[in-house]
Amino acid sequence: MLSNKHCETANMNAVMDKRNHRKLDLHEILTWMEQDALVDNESAHMLRTIAIGSGYDHKHPLQIIAERNWKHPQHANLLSLEFLTEWFARRLGIPYERIDPLKIEVTAVTEVMSYAYAARFNVLPIRVSETSITVATAQPYDREWMDELSHIHQKDFEIVISNPEDISHYLLEFYTVSRSVVGAQSAGQSLSLIHI
């Protein structure tokens, strides 16, 4: 569990980085893991050294770390991507949420932004209410999209931390389903006009 000092630091950083719209990098996250005794200095240094180049550019830092198959130093459980994502959310003081496709109104969430825009930031709207929109992300300080969409929708945006691989997977799945629904509706309307 995080100390109050860690939570306060994370919250202060969140305020600062909301202005900067930056992505958290591997070095920062490894440093936090060292501070929380999840990885030793030697392993962290080695990963910083080898995780360089275009082959790592498209991956979230948590994915790169999870691929090392490190074990938790206290109970030897695997530091899986899901475990790391939950730890990451606690470290930042931002709610964690496992994406459950059965609880999501696909048509509503895919109307928030285009697939191309969502894929650009790897963010996924998961709830839409009359006053707010909840978006899953794994890069909570990169909020350029939030500033732009707040003006369009005139609603408050809330963020939750989710597994970056789940976000990418369901992003494609939800928007594919949405296009199929729209296509079916358009075909149905065309047939109705033919029979009028």
Image (cartoon, rainbow, N blue to C red):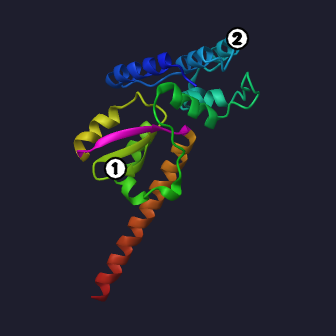
Q: Is residue 182 above or below residue 187?
A: above
Point out residue 104 in the picture as x, y percentages from the top left corner.
46, 56
Residue drawn 47% across and 36% down? 95
* Magenta stretch encompasses residue 54: no
* Magenta stretch encompasses residue 158: yes
Whether pointer 1 and pointer 2 mark residues with C-beta atoms closer than 8 Å, the reply is no
Under mark 2, the amino acid is Glu
Residue sitting nearer the eye, 49 or 40: 40
Point out residue 105 in the picture as x, y percentages from the top left corner.
42, 58
Residue sitting nearer the eye, 20 or 130: 130
Res 33 quadrant in image: top right
Residue sitting nearer the eye, 81 or 129: 129
Neighbour tally class for label 2: few under 14, some 14-19, many 20 plus, Cα within 10 Å: few
Tell me the tag on residue 151: none
Point out residue 135 in the picture as x, y percentages from the top left corner.
41, 43
Bounds of the magenta segment = 154-164
Kindly tell me whether residue 123 is visible in this rendering: no
Q: In the rendered image, which residue does mark 2 sit on?
A: 42
Q: Quadrant of the C terminus?
A: bottom left
Residue drawn 28% across and 53% down? 130
Kindly tell me whether residue 38 is visible in this rendering: yes
The image shows a total of numbered marks equal to 2
Residue drawn 31% across and 85% down? 194
Neighbour tally class for label 1: few under 14, some 14-19, many 20 plus, Cα within 10 Å: some
Under mark 1, the amino acid is Val
Tell me the tag on residue 112: 1
Point out residue 74 in the picture as x, y percentages from the top left corner.
73, 23
